[in-house]
Amino acid sequence: MPVRKEKQTALVVSKKKSLSQRLAKDIRRNWILYLLMLPGFLSLVLFKIGPVGGMVIAFEKFSAFQGVFGSKWVWFDNFKRIFQDPYIPKVVINTILLAVLSVVVVFPIPIIFSLFLNEIRTKWIRGTVQSLSFLPYFISAAVMVSIMATLLSPTSGIVNSIIRSLGGDSINFMAKPGWFRPLYVILEIWQSFGYSAIIYIAAMMNIDPSLYEAAEADGANRWDKMFHITLPGISTSIIVMLIISVGNIFTVNLDRILLMYNPSVYDTADVIQTYVYRIAFESKGFPDYSYGTAVNILKSVIAFILVTTVNKVADKFAETRLF
Amino acid sequence: MKKKLISVILSIALVGTLLTGCGGQSQGSSAGTSGTEDTASDAADQDETAEDAGSEEAGEVTASGDNSYTMFMRNTYVGWIRELNWYDVAEEKTGIHVEYVEGPDEFADVYAEVDQRIISNTLPDAVMTKLAQTNVYGPQGAFVDMAPYIEKYAPNLQKYLDDNADYKALVSDENGAIYGLVKESPIFQDFLGYRVDHLEKANIDADSIQNVEDFTEAMRTLKEFYGKDNPNYYPLTGRECAIRFAAWFECLSTVSAEESHGIYTSHFKDYSFDIMNENAYTMVETMKTWYDEGMIQPQFAEGTFTEGDWESDMINGNGTFFYDYYNRAEWFMENGGPDADPDYQMGVLGNFKDASGNIILGAGTCKYNEECVTAINANCDEDKIKTILTFIDFFYSQEGIDLANYGVEGESYEVAADGSKEFIVDYAAEEAKPEGEKKWSFLSDRFTVCKPVDNKAFFQWNADLIADACAKYMTEDCVRTGINLSYTAEESEELSNLIATVFDAEIAGIVSFVTGNTELTPESWKAFQDEMNAMGLSRIEEIQVEAYNNTYGG
């Protein structure tokens, strides 16, 4: 019998077509679907995957005139410079602190918000609150920072007016290094929590209503339902969002930082992106695109390692993974 | 079948839309191109002007073929050019028409677009770029070596090169090649503007303010006088960064064949300082006193006061002094000062004096502006190069110099009996004309065309308040002229990276001392100096000395 089984397996293997043959067959069968996929696929290749090839300039002394293929190849010189640059540790620390604060403080806010919003029974109130929370997402960084600067103005801002009316002295919040990170995080929450909350609210819509009915029958109160049904019900979305957040840990909002930037807060506000921007684009000399790209590649590699690690951890402890 | 047809049409439409965005590179890449999409809207008007010009002044010469060329330039500059009467006369006289391709407004974006145009092979015939770019791209073959063509087609420019060894040294590489022509700039310093009426009401004699100590004492009196009723009053105000008073303390950054102190590159005038100079400690100490006693606008000292905030403060009487662009005092007179207060009157104080009574030099601009460089696309043929250089050469002829600095005799100026030229058009009336309207204007601090600058004309072309102050304080006795330095590509790269780190760190450190975030003691100051040297300040100084010797053969 075992001999016969082996023969059968061999027959199946020999009959199995190659990937290209199978793909060709699938394309013939579902050509309309493939045709509809074509624009998206081309867009992905031309504008997402293709430009990644340009990152090869990190290994070159890039000149726009000589191009990617003609510029001098310098191997890892730009990467060596990163590790020899005495200023890099400072901007890396600033970036990580800002990013960790963003993840730790910003990440839970939309979850809490959506949990409470879900408890509101009046539909129009829930809808209005949700829409209002979503609005700041569409406001540009320049306007957001201007609003904040106006509110915090030491001479005419409402915050300082309150401080003065309580007997205190005006504080120029925008010029205090210690206030830079809290203000950045507050803006991040203000701008993004409504958007993130939509994802959690959408996940809550998929929770089976019979679970709530059963819990009510068992005498569960609102808190019990929130912590024992709603929260576990959206845990997959939370983990996916957490993995994405960790992947973006080095991606701070450059526009916002540049707008909040001033000599008084350089100590805390100077991050990898602002440093690279100064070297690559604001340079008084010849712009150093290669060095800027090298820093960004290193940043991406670290982010990739972090995402993979968190993905593994999530898979191990929460049985949920992004990829 | 219907569904299939719709699917195919949709897919094709989407792919078509997608690929349209990829664009092409048919424009501007070769000699003889006649503009790009940016110039299209203006082309008709300009062609008309040029054709008129051709028929009147240059016989059969018209603004087509080799009598026109395209040039990429920052959009603000293009706007200025289009308003200038004298520029139109120059096109008439040469019979050459330039079609400008407008770039972005931000300087960094302009130079980035030059890179993009080089990559995509869409560079027009000529381009306004910066010396750091022409120094690298020129030898690589992106730009024409103009040296032989200047000799052949531009006699006036050649004479200018021969007469100005510093200019020739700056624009030529080690092989004598010239890839970019640097714009000449007027030489001027910032002025200490003040409210004359404020000082009078507080019984302060402006002439008695001769040095920083007098100035501090005057501010103390003003604070006492105006500050008691106005909590928002600070005698000294300004915009953006307050680390701009180093000249008063004689601690400017410097460079010579032997040594260099502080960051001189790009900061020979604005934000020029040397933290290793012992007077720098005094400067920070004094600024801290101003800050602690409420004599300097705190947001200005902290670096968060915008231009709008400052202007508003000066107009509304919340400030008395500022140290800024030379003609700003007049700007306040013209932009709401007297409307806000009938007594409003601005004045300009002269340079401070040192302990021995000698005038302390203010930090002046360089004679050549390395950020405004004209280069020619290497794809241009000789006819096109000739056209471009002929047009530029005109501005180096006596006729061109007179035209660009004074305009047309009888229309904008007249010659006095002693041979001097005097404007006969009114500065205020001309400069007040709405944006886009043609006018006589001779603001040579603006980049319009590559040309020599007549400083006398530049200073004369101001309101009386500023013209008088310029006559007194824009002299060699008062202004330190900046020195242009030429760097190799390697030096330029290293220097740029170091400055990107050190300059901001220096500013942040000084601001921190002034505002009290860091305690100012000789020990903490020494630690700050050491930190800056470790970050690369000393290396910057070394490179600057090397560059000085490379440029001027020290």
Image (tube, grey):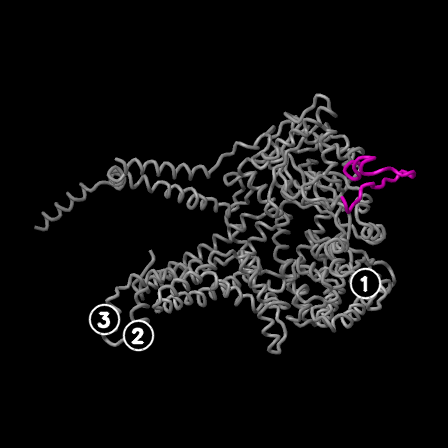
Give amino acid for label 2.
Asp
Q: Is residue A28 left or right of residue A181?
A: left
| Magenta stretch bounds | B402-429
Residue B141, position as x, y percentages in the image: 60, 35
In three-dimensional space, the C-alpha distance between marks 1 and 2, rounded to whole angstroms, equals 73 Å
Which of label 1 and label 2 is nearer to you?
1
Residue furthest toward the bottom? A167
Q: Based on the displayed image, in which of its 4 quarters is residue B514 positioned?
A: bottom right
Residue closer to the observer: A210 or A314: A210
**In terms of secondary structure, where does tag 1 sit?**
helix
Q: Residues within 10 Å of mark 3 (few under 14, many from 20)?
A: few
Residue corresponding to mark 2: A224
> Magenta stretch containing residue B459, yes or no?
no
Q: Based on the displayed image, in which of its 4 quarters is residue B125 positioned?
A: top right
Residue shown at 46% from the left, 58% from the top: A137
Residue B145, position as x, y percentages in the image: 66, 33
Which of label 1 and label 3 is nearer to you?
1
Residue shown at 87% from the left, 37% from the top: B415
Give amino acid for label 1.
Asp
Residue corresponding to mark 1: B197
Q: Is residue B51 left or right of residue A41?
A: right
**In terms of secondary structure, where does tag 3 sit?**
helix
Residue furthest toward the top? B60
Which of the labelled discs sits on residue A214, or is there none? 3
